[in-house]
Amino acid sequence: MKNFGKRFGVMSSLGVTMGHFFDTYIVDLVKGRKRYWTPEGIEARRQADTEGIFTIQYPEEQLPVPEEFRVLPFLVYDEGENGEKNLRCTACGICAKVCPPQCIWIYRATDPVTGKPSPHPAEFHIDMDICMNCGFCAEYCPFDAIKMDHDFELASYTRGESHLYGLDKLMKPVSYYESIRPVNASREAAARAEKARPKA
């Protein structure tokens, strides 16, 4: 009886697979190629009640990334009138302190005239091989200077320096942040505007 149960389970599973296989051709005849290479087709294949093929042909097709999806941190900068990049980061070091795997290193800049520390990072490094994508750095940053990115296609054939990100790789404009996280960006902008509003 045990063998019969196992065989029945295998045959039942194969039946589901074969059902999807034949349904694919039927649905293709009805809906045509609109099921592929379009956002509507990808969304249709994500549903639990989809018929026929439901796999996404990665990398040609990609699932839409949810707004709260997080991969690696990046530094936000505001673009000035003359095109300068004004980093929000003040090199306070809170992100490095709260980082569980301790993969963030910050070196504060020094004012060339006075020789005193300046509220800007001279160097900012994140070791992406160590980063655990927890988002603590972005959550604890008091200046909204560090955010979590959506870019997950970071595989390479080398390790070491290629995965040690400096300011050149970490800096991204606020417009990029607004494009990947529009809801969060608008909420933060409203909060900043409310805070800047003069008290009555």
Image: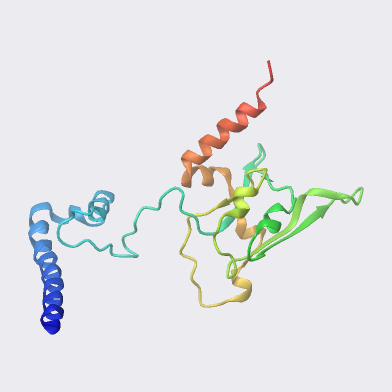
Residue 197 in the image, given as x and y percentages of width and height: 65, 23
**Quadrant of the image containing the N terminus:** bottom left
Residue found at x 15% / y 69%: 17
Residue extending furthest front?
1
**Side (left or right) of 186 relative to 97:** left
Total number of numbered discs in the rendering: 0
In the figure, 196 relative to 42: above or below?
A: above
In this view of the protein, which residue sits in the foreground, 10 or 158?
Answer: 10
Residue extending furthest right?
114
Residue found at x 71% / y 52%: 94
In the figure, 80 relative to 99: above or below?
A: above
Residue 99 in the image, given as x and y percentages of width and height: 65, 59
**Quadrant of the image containing the C terminus:** top right
In this view of the protein, which residue sits in the foreground, 9 or 1?
Answer: 1
**Side (left or right) of 4 relative to 177:** left
In the figure, 147 relative to 82: above or below?
A: below
**Side (left or right) of 185 relative to 108:** left
In the figure, 41 relative to 187: above or below?
A: below
Residue 120 in the image, given as x and y percentages of width and height: 76, 49
**Which picture quadrant has residue 108?**
bottom right
Residue found at x 59% / y 32%: 191
Q: Is residue 146 visible?
A: no
Q: How is the image coloured?
A: rainbow
Q: Is residue 3 visible?
A: yes
**Which picture quadrant has residue 18?**
bottom left
Residue extending furthest top?
200
